Image (cartoon, rainbow, N blue to C red):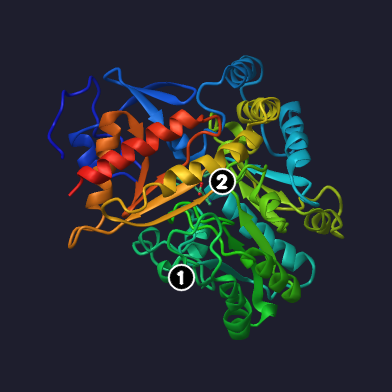
Amino acid sequence: MSTAVDTPAYDLEPFWMPFTANRQFKGRPRILVSAKDMYFTTDDGRKLLDGTAGLWCVNAGHCRTPIVNAIKAAAETLDYAPAFQIGHPGVFHAAQKLVALAPGELKHVFYCNSGSEAVDSALKIALAYQRARGEASRTRLIGRERGYHGVGFGGISVGGMVNNRKAFGLALPGADHIAHTYDLEHNAYSRGLPKWGAHLADELETRIVALHDASNIAALIVEPVSGSAGVLPPPEGYLQRLRQICDRHGILLIFDEVITGFGRLGRAFAADYFGVVPDMITFAKGVTNATVPMGGVLVHNRIYEAFMNSPTPDIMVELFHGYTYSGHPLASAASIATLDLYAEEEIFKRAAALAPYFENALHGLRGLPHVIDIRNLGLMGAVELAPRPGQPVARAFEVYLRCFEKGFLLRQSGDILTLSPPLIAEKKHIDDLVGALADELKRVA
Ligand code: PXG
Ligand code: PLP
């Protein structure tokens, strides 16, 4: 599949592409030159239906005018403002709008520029908070197998995807993991939440707390629905149990909502969808509709107050952490316009309304060749294929490439194909995407 096509007018070699098979790509590049609403346009002038909202991030569709205009205006007015010891109005407006959406008492926000930075920030806040409240021995960070928390050393330490860890040494010491909830024997073809598996949450107590003692554990971080690992919705009651166990043992619960935030499940946050309020939420992606990089951590009032009540003089910095671009003016403007657009167009409700149709369409692929599981929640969906014997990844990658050639963008990871369309998708877009996938599943060897 890597025969060369016309050489583009620029050199492909200097750019080392992230999470990309560079050799395959550079032999046969796939280049996007523009986008509007549900579609990209490729460099050879073809329309490509965006079945993945970019990388799970373009929730309101592409190049939306109010967001574009807000970014233009910000770029002309205040290109940058230092982020440390000084501010600008945009970031305070953005924070105010964001916390208004946030669940429970998560009414403070620490800004950064990506999901990976958000995770690093949340883990550091957890450690510093435990210390500030006199529990400095709580230094262990717990994640979950098959979790994806970005690519920083913090994120890969609590993350649980082997390819993202195996080449990078020891990462953070002291991290540990609870079990993932993937189980085809019990849960294959679940629609929405699997019925089996809530008891897997108990491991946090019976294995992790039993082994390390709660007095050494700062926080547990989980994705409410694992995204990158191939859409693994939590078993019914599982997140509620995690919340109870964390409360019992003084362990902070962090939801990594980089994908699930901003309407992917039909509510502002997965915390709302599940009725489980964590102590912190990490977010990124949809906060600006992916137009300008921005991420952050929503923090419980109690945590923020622990820092503000520090006995140190008020000229002392409370948290020695931050980024040059925390709350960047362009990102702030983009975020304000994005959150306004989500509200005006009731984007989260639209996602909720489309979710049952999406579920039915996706589960209609059951029984097609190679399919061994289908999973979904909100507008997140995955179709898992049996690997071609001796050639892991090859079958799903071929389906991905053929769909691309036919004008449909899916995401492939291992032998799993995922769909996460922009939340403005209509039924016909779902039909087109799932139809294209069905055709290729019938064709692929
Ligand atoms: N946490 C979660 C839950 C994520 O999904 C990150 C952290 C890291 O965010 P940044 O902005 O640093 O990439 C993510 C990002 C995929 C895919 O197709 C998923 C992500 C990014 C790129 C591709 O599975 N998730
Ligand atoms: N490396 C050096 C040498 C720096 O001076 C800085 C920031 O001043 C950084 C890294 C961190 O960059 P950022 O704040 O964009 O994360």
Label 1 CA crowd tier, 10 Å (few <14, some 14–19, many 20+) = few
SS for callout 1: helix
Relative horizontal placement of residue 351, taking residue 189 as reference (left or right): right
In this rendering, is residue 413 above or below 353?
below
User: Mark 2 and 1 residues: CB-CB less than 8 Å, in contact?
Assistant: no
> Which of the two residues, 60 or 236, is positioned nearer the viewer here?
236
In this rendering, is residue 392 above or below 324?
below
In this rendering, is residue 338 above or below 224?
above
> Which of the two residues, 97 or 362, is positioned nearer the viewer here?
362
**What is the total number of numbered labels drawn onto the structure image?**
2
> Which of the two residues, 429 or 27, is positioned nearer the viewer here?
429
In this rendering, is residue 288 above or below 160?
above
Please give the residue where the numbered disc 2 appears in the rendered image: 378
N-terminal label among 2 and 1: 1
Q: Position of residue 238 (x, y in %)?
A: 62, 67
Please give the residue where the numbered disc 1 appears in the rendered image: 186
Tell me which residue sits at (64%, 46%) in the image. Answer: 322
Alpha carbon distance from label 2 to label 1: 21 Å
Quadrant of the drawing holding the N terminus? top left
Q: Position of residue 338 (x, y in %)?
A: 64, 28
Residue 352 in view in this figure: yes
Residue 294 in view in this figure: no
Q: Position of residue 219 (x, y in %)?
A: 65, 66
Relative horizontal placement of residue 397, taking residue 179 as reference (left or right): left
Task: Indicate if the residue with disc 2 has its beta carbon within 8 Å of ligand 1.
Answer: no
Residue 362, quarter of the rendered image: top left
Amino acid bearing label 2? Gly
